[in-house]
């Protein structure tokens, strides 16, 4: 198959998967709307709009913008994508594609691209609502915010691929995803911002991909370059999870 033909094939797969993705209102709500809705709920509580000395003069709502973004990455990578991939495998779609010039990797790549795009859109919505509604400052270190966001999204998608790799059925994927989802929410700071955690707990959480991402995004939002340790932790988790998923993932 020529390069041009291969490119057209991948484009066709991406368009087909995009049409299917837009027909899933529940997934779109939880990825695009729910994180910002949580931000609005937090921002509507008066005490959370007041500067806190314990947070270095920041407001709780200021910290919840990156948390909302991380929640979108977690929902997309852990709750939305794995059941789709496992469902394709369970119904034999990946096995049949493996026997054709259009390899199943094109379908998986399309899902990763679509979920990554959804995370980016959700991040833009959260940043816009935070700025326009609650006066949250835009990231002061945009050059550091972008790689931190990309790494956070990649780590979530890698974790989702690993979940799909070890789950034989869609029901198992959903059960495993739910079991991982709530600890991921905790480490990203949904219930308690990572910056407000006690020192020891904050250090432990910082060793997880979403805890490290939360620290990196907070630093970039404040105008600092994200700590290389936080970026490295997220990157290492991503590489390890991708390697594990590639080793364990089967087409049937």
Image (spheres, rainbow, N blue to C red):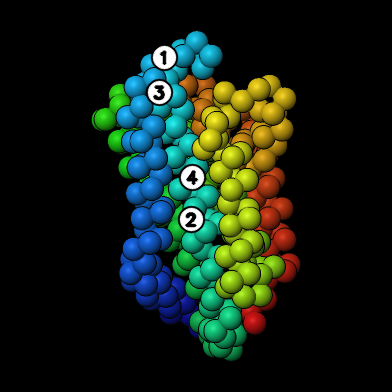
Q: Is residue 146 visible?
A: no
Looking at the image, is mark 1 or mark 3 nearer the viewer?
Answer: 3
Residue tagged 2: 76
Residue 229, percent from left and from top: 67, 31
Could you tell me how far apart the alpha carbons at marks 4 and 3 are, in whole angstroms? Answer: 19 Å
Residue tagged 1: 51
Could you tell me how far apart the alpha carbons at marks 1 and 3 are, in whole angstroms? Answer: 8 Å
Q: Secondary structure at mark 4?
A: helix
Could you tell me how far apart the alpha carbons at marks 2 and 4 are, in whole angstroms? Answer: 8 Å
Residue at the spot 61% in from the left edge and 25% down from the top edge = 197
* Rendered image: mark on residue 71: 4
CB within 8 Å, label 2 to label 4: no
Could you tell me how far apart the alpha carbons at marks 1 and 2 are, in whole angstroms? Answer: 31 Å
Residue at the spot 67% in from the left edge and 35% down from the top edge = 205
The numbered mark, 2 or 4, whose residue comes first in the sequence reads 4
Residue 96, percent from left and from top: 56, 88
CB within 8 Å, label 1 to label 2: no
């Amino acid at each position: 198959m020529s390069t041009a033909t291969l490119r057209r094939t991948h484009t066709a797969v991406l368009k087909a998967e995009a049409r299917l993705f837009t027909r899933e209102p529940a997934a779109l709500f939880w990825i695009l709307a729910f994180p910002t809705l949580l931000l609005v709920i937090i921002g509507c509580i008066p005490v959370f709009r007041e500067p806190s000395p314990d947070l270095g003069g920041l407001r709780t709502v200021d910290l919840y913008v990156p948390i909302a973004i991380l929640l979108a990455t977690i929902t997309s990578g852990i709750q939305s994508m794995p059941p789709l991939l496992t469902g394709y495998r369970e119904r034999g779609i990946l096995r049949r594609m493996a026997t054709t010039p259009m390899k199943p990797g094109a379908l998986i790549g399309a899902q990763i691209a679509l979920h990554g795009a959804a995370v980016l859109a959700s991040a833009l919505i959260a940043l816009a609502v935070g700025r326009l509604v609650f006066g949250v400052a835009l990231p002061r270190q945009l050059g550091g915010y972008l790689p931190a966001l990309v790494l956070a999204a990649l780590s979530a998608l890698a974790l989702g691929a690993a979940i799909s790799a070890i789950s034989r059925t869609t029901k198992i994927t959903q059960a495993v995803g739910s079991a991982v989802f709530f600890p991921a929410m905790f480490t990203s700071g949904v219930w308690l911002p990572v910056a407000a955690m006690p020192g020891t707990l904050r250090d432990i959480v910082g060793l997880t991909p979403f805890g490290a991402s939360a620290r990196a995004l907070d630093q970039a939002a404040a105008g600092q370059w994200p700590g290389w340790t936080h970026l490295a932790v997220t990157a290492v988790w991503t590489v390890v999870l991708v390697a594990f998923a590639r080793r364990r993932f089967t087409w049937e």
